Image (cartoon, coloured by chain):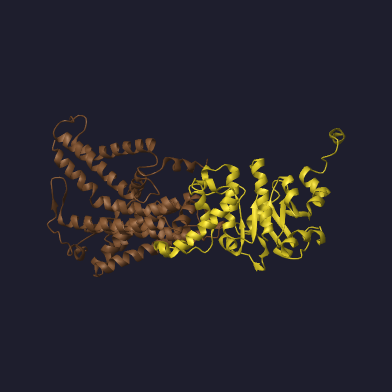
Amino acid sequence: MDFLFIIQQTLSSTLGVNAIIFALAAIGLNMHFGYTGLLNFGQAGFLAIGAYSVAVPVITFGLSLWVAFLIGIFNSILFALLLGVPTLRLRADYLAIVTIAFAEIVRQVARSATFNDSLGGSDGITGKFGKEFFDLNPFKGGLTTPILRFNGNDLWVVLTGWVLVAIITFVMWIMVNSPWGRVMRAIREDEDAVRSLGKNVYLYKMQSLIIGGVIGSMAGFVYALSRQSVQPDNYGTALTFFAYTVLILGGAARVFAPIVGAMIFWFLIVFIEQILREGVSSNIIPDWLIGVNQVGQIRFMLMGLGLMLLMIFRPQGIFGDKKELALDARA
Amino acid sequence: MQEHNSGRSFALTTSQTPGSSKPDPILIADNIVRHFGGLTAVNVEHLEIQRGSITALIGPNGAGKTTFFNLLTGYDSPNSGTWSFNGKALNGVPPHKVARLGMVRTFQLTKALYRLTVLENMLLGAKEQKGESVLFSVFPWIWRAQEEAIRVKAVSILKNFKLIEKQDDFAAALSGGQRKLLEMARALMVEPEMVMLDEPMAGVNPALKQSLLEHIKELRNEGKTVLFVEHDMDMVHEISDWVIVMAQGQIIAEGTPATVMGNAQVIEAYLGAHHDADLSSEGA
């Protein structure tokens, strides 16, 4: 077994592009679910809007990438309003259903044959729409060390991506610890009580939906840029649930939870896969037990098992407070 | 003290009939009707609440008291009717605006915000906080001074309510009675003119009950109006200046506590028409 290779692959994923995407998606969910109690199961929809918004204006309409970023933020605000106006008066569980539907509508519309010319149908869009971004890269040679390896483009995405995550986390930290954040957490506990104190709950929930949605669409920017392509089926419900996994792994309503959650998530997935792959190829794991082609599925099984154990033995996540979680039982 | 006395002395001169007019009403309701399917939960023709008084709203279970509360505070909309607070019509006004106008309520099932600390519960109540705006929240220096002033006020109310030792505990860690106290203390942070208490004594132990009573009397001394729903007749007797009785959605009697509790119609509503009849003769 090549342990150094396993470590290199694992660490590069722990700090890699995917961890950034899931961290951003989960930061958005943390705003929705962790701080405001909005059960948004449609976060993938916001990622899709972000991803298509950087690709389509550049490829189809020949606009600048920087304009496309602005379009992406505008679109995510627009969709948050569209989603929020009819649904934010609903109770939490109904909101969950509507948001799942919202994300699926976005995905199905994007992959429909009707918009083949502009959105690329089920094949999505592939092209050099990130050129303006990668032209700025001062590290075109990438990074190769025994324990960490990124190609030139990935290194640039990783560096800018973590800076973005850091800025957003810092601003979130200030906001949730302000009186504004206090109203948000109060809404999570009991909307009617907050209304009785003269706060416009609907307005606050809308703000939460927009802020979390915009951060989600930034995850979509990173997703699209890093791959220089947008595939509609990458933005299915599984993406939302992985983002929830990341959030709960870290501990909901904790500012650093999404970052650490995303790192652990990708550490585990890649570490398990690499161990299995190396084990099978060097015949330490016998062929009759696990075949080479089964590794991909089995890593998710083991991942699932690990998450189950976490939920049983540490339901509050890495950063959470078990006593605080128990209060939710309305004792 | 003249103003404060009027809250009590009006009872001597006011007609003790349902829907009677008060010398200085803060709340006036007309023809409030609320149907739930075929059931008429509330049907109030006319009601006035005297400013600066403690008014009790009593009635048997299912009389429509809480529904009436919900209608007045904007949590539910009536099928018809008009009502006004301080001369301002409240039809279609959402709950948070009703609260901002100065009419603040509590709930029958206490709504302490469990995963906020006791102090945070209190701070939340203050009105017009700059830091509650999404834009200003990012710039702590804009709201820090105001936050500190609010904290000082919250601490002084918490001391008065003997919850100060609990200020850093989660609200969920309080006992049922303490949560009632917290809810009332929190309502005071809004600086209301009128406080609506939905069963403030339910599930509160006798020792705490006495202190709640004192707090309610204190509100009147400060010139605030109190309207409360309650089943505890001793309490109603002890602190209210005026009692309104509801049964089957209608107001069947109002007057001073002593008069109302001797009213035959009220006794009938609570206990049934034949409550004092001999069982054997009823069967015959």
Task: Say whether residue A328 is left or right of residue B110.
Answer: left
Which residue is at 22% across, 47% downward?
A13
**Chain drawn brown, letter?**
A
Total marks drawn? 0
Front residue (pair A61, B280): B280
Residue B116 point in image, percent of width and height = 48, 49
Does the image show residue A196?
yes
- Figure quadrant of the N terminus of chain B: bottom right
Hue of chain B? yellow
Front residue (pair A142, A274): A142
Which residue is at 35% across, 66% downward?
A74
Does the image show residue A108?
no
Residue B256 point in image, percent of width and height = 79, 54
Front residue (pair A292, B110): B110
Task: Say whether residue A179 is left or right of residue A281.
Answer: right
Task: Say whether residue A82 is left or right of residue B45.
Answer: left
